[in-house]
Image: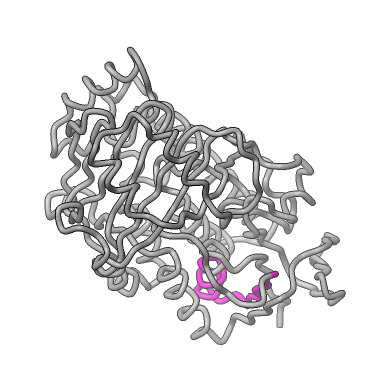
């Protein structure tokens, strides 16, 4: 029997990778540094491309069942409250892309993936033990764990996050780039939210050096709020207590609607937003990276989880078709242009969201000109698994910023 593929990290990307590899008949040993698989965080968005990958994993319906179904994504100017653009997400959208757009509680998505992995007899899960050393040989990889235990595998997939030890072994390129933004997040039961604030839409309020996103979760039972703004903080991690005074200063010029949303929260959790410049060197022989370990991105396109799940499916497809070194090389070559496009588009969307002065005026004018049923600006993201086309092929900005 061949040695298992070792997957480091049991977040969304690592679980998706373990599931995808088991689906093509490979044994997997999944190792996670945390003592339990428990996702921190709040909401996330799953576009048609994410659902296409989940369908390949056989869990699209299970994920859909734990999601909320927003009627539209609405963008507003945070200062005036004016609606700038609306992306309708109903039957016409689903007919265009073949799959829906949903929002989910991160922990719920991870739980669906975990249950699917646990049902597989080809996956072994080890908790409380992370990767501390890697030795690559011609026909195997020796993975040293924090406990001192050694695992011998046919390959290693590093899905161990933005501060990946596997990446450090491969690239040694240091800490991720601090973006100059922080995110404050909170989740409330809908009973604590005034009726006139609740909405069946994803609401995005964009403004000078800040924006705010809110939507319902868990079948509508929860209300998710994320406020992002410019900051010089450099605190590691993403579960730090937020500073209400700092948040208030960042949104001081926002309209009454935004102020009411912010005032509902008694305690915020905060994290510093980081990413990396695109890089295509994240495979070497029998070691490769996946998700944030390979291509961390800012959240302005809401695509981090989707890209990790896409990675997992693409990796398993290549492993099913070739020897490990060839498969890993083909996987990286296929995914790097796609992920680089999303990384850079996310940065550009952040600039558009936080525009001020003349740039804000130009952004608002472009958004107002966009039709509700014009889905083509985002087609490269939602219907393909490739990079975005050149900007000149798209006539005007999409809802998520310039394509």
Residue pictured at 29% horizontal, 22% vertical: 363
State which quadrant residue 384 falls in.
Answer: top left
Residue 80 in the image: above or below residue 334? above
- Closest to the observer, 153 or 100: 100
Residue pictured at 24% horizontal, 23% vertical: 364
Q: Quadrant of the C terminus?
A: top left
189 is within the stretch colored magenta? no
Part of the protein shown in magenta = 16-33
Question: Looking at the picture, how far across and down is residue 203, in whole percent?
Answer: 25, 45
Question: Looking at the picture, how far across and down is residue 3, in whole percent?
Answer: 73, 76
32 is within the stretch colored magenta? yes
- Closest to the observer, 342 or 264: 264
- Closest to the observer, 91 or 252: 252
Residue pictured at 28% horizontal, 27% vertical: 397
Q: Quadrant of the N terminus?
A: bottom right
- Closest to the observer, 9 or 268: 268
* Residue 338 in view here: no
State which quadrant residue 135 falls in.
Answer: bottom right
Question: Looking at the picture, how far across and down is residue 127, in whole percent?
Answer: 68, 78
State which quadrant residue 256 falls in.
Answer: top left
Residue pictured at 48% horizontal, 45% vertical: 183
């Amino acid at each position: 029997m061949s040695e298992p593929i070792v997957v480091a990290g049991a977040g969304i990307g690592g679980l998706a990778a373990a599931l995808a590899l088991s689906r093509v008949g490979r044994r997997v040993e999944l190792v996670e540094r945390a003592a339990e698989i428990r996702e921190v965080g709040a909401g996330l968005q799953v576009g048609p491309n994410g659902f296409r990958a989940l369908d390949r994993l056989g869990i699209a319906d299970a994920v859909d069942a734990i999601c909320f179904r927003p009627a539209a994504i609405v963008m507003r100017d945070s200062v005036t409250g004016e609606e700038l653009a609306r992306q309708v997400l109903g039957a016409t959208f689903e007919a265009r892309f073949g799959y829906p757009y949903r929002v989910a509680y991160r922990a719920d998505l991870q739980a669906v993936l975990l249950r699917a992995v646990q049902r597989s007899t080809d996956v072994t899960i080890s908790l409380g033990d992370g990767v501390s050393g890697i030795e690559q040989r011609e026909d195997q990889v020796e993975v040293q764990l924090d406990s001192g235990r050694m695992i011998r595998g046919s390959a290693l997939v590093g899905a161990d996050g933005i501060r990946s030890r596997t990446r450090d072994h491969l690239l040694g390129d240091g800490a991720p780039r601090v973006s100059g933004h922080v995110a404050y997040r909170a989740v409330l039961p809908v009973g604590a939210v005034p009726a006139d604030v609740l909405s069946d839409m994803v609401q995005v309020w964009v403004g000078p050096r800040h924006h705010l996103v809110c939507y319902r979760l868990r079948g509508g039972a929860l209300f998710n709020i994320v406020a992002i703004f410019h900051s010089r903080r450099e605190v590691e991690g993403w579960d730090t207590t937020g500073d209400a005074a700092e948040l208030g200063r960042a949104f001081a010029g926002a309209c009454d609607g935004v102020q009411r949303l912010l005032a509902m929260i008694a305690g915020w959790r905060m994290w510093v937003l980081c990413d990396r410049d695109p890089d295509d060197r994240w495979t070497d022989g029998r070691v490769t990276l996946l998700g944030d370990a390979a291509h961390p991105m800012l959240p302005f396109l809401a695509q981090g989880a989707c890209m990790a799940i896409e990675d997992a499916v693409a990796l398993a497809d290549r492993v099913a078709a070739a020897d490990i070194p060839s498969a890993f090389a083909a996987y990286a070559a296929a995914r790097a242009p796609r992920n680089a496009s999303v990384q850079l588009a996310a940065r550009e969307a952040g600039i558009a969201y936080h525009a001020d002065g003349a740039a804000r005026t130009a952004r608002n004018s472009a958004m107002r000109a966009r039709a509700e049923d014009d889905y083509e600006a985002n087609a490269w993201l939602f219907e393909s698994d490739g990079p975005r086309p050149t900007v000149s092929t798209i006539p005007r900005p999409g809802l998520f910023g310039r394509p």
